[in-house]
Amino acid sequence: MAEFPNELFDLAFVGGHKEGYPDLASVAEDENWGYSKVSPKNPNPILVNYVNYTYSRLVEENKVVLSGDGQKLCFNTGLVTPNQEEIFALFTVNRTDGKQPWYLKSWCKRSSHELSSFSELPELAQYFDDPSALLFDVRKELRVNVDHIIEENKERFPEPYRSMELFALRNFLNGSLDAVKIRVRRNYKTAIPQYYGGRMQILLPLCLSNPKVADLALAVERYQDHYRASTCLTLDMAYNNARQLAKPDRDWLQP
């Protein structure tokens, strides 16, 4: 089994493909790959993160595949065309000295003639074995380390909360936690799974002032008999992590 670097940009030179992967965005099923509240230089920051982390996961699972002659390499992006045809990243040997060993040639549909060199096409990335990891079990206790969340993540809070004293912010956060516990009991789809640090977690919305608008996402880990939360994420961070598994329902998770 061939060994590949964990980072995509160490594996391959991607040239003009790197800045937002515009070719992939145009081939894939229509999706908003940008942030709504900030405008980074990269036009498709969510897509770039998605592809890079998908590649890293596929390396862990040995699902990056060489062609029989060793001159091509490909992996399954996990994305599909508007007609639901799988899309693969195709690389060829980079013959430029001093560069990465491969370069990105194209994004190919499963039916593409360019993939004929592969006797078998690689599988999708897999992130979980137990489907129950995707759901939040409301029968289990949710334990939240409120002080730790504030002290370690205060810079992630939007204003005016970021500038508040600890006691005031603690009250706002406790109120949001009470509300989300009720919300997830009424609608199981409120809980959105994410993959981070090699494990599954659940994201819950923290609405600090408007019950219809999430300000942050609470990252919740499952233990045998309870859940525990000790960190929160900006919505951009949360969406990037959740998108590795599937396109999230944007009921509240809006990057």
Image (cartoon, rainbow, N blue to C red):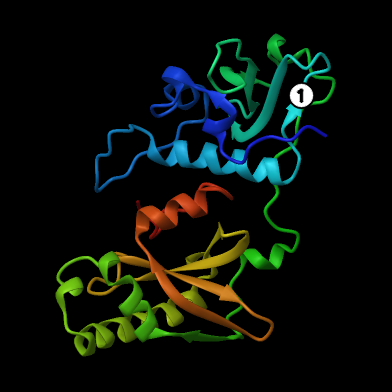
* Residue in the picture at 55% in, 48% down: 244
Q: Is residue 179 left or right of residue 122?
A: left
Q: Is residue 47 left or right of residue 41?
A: right
For residue 191, say whether it is visible.
no
For residue 134, say whether it is visible.
yes
Relative height, residue 46 to residue 185 (above, below): above
Q: Quadrant of residue 83?
A: top right
Q: Position of residue 28 (x, y in %)?
A: 52, 27
* Residue in the picture at 35% in, 74% down: 152
Q: Position of residue 27 (x, y in %)?
A: 51, 22
Q: Amino acid at mark 1?
A: Leu
Identify the residue position indicated by label 1 in the image: 66
Q: Position of residue 252 (x, y in %)?
A: 38, 60
* Residue in the picture at 39% in, 69% down: 232
Residue closer to the observer: 4 or 186: 4
The quadrant in which the N terminus is found is top right
Relative height, residue 208 to residue 128 (above, below): below
Q: From this viewpoint, which residue is outermost toward the front? A: 98
Q: Is residue 238 left or right of residue 132?
A: left
Q: Is residue 24 left or right of residue 71?
A: left
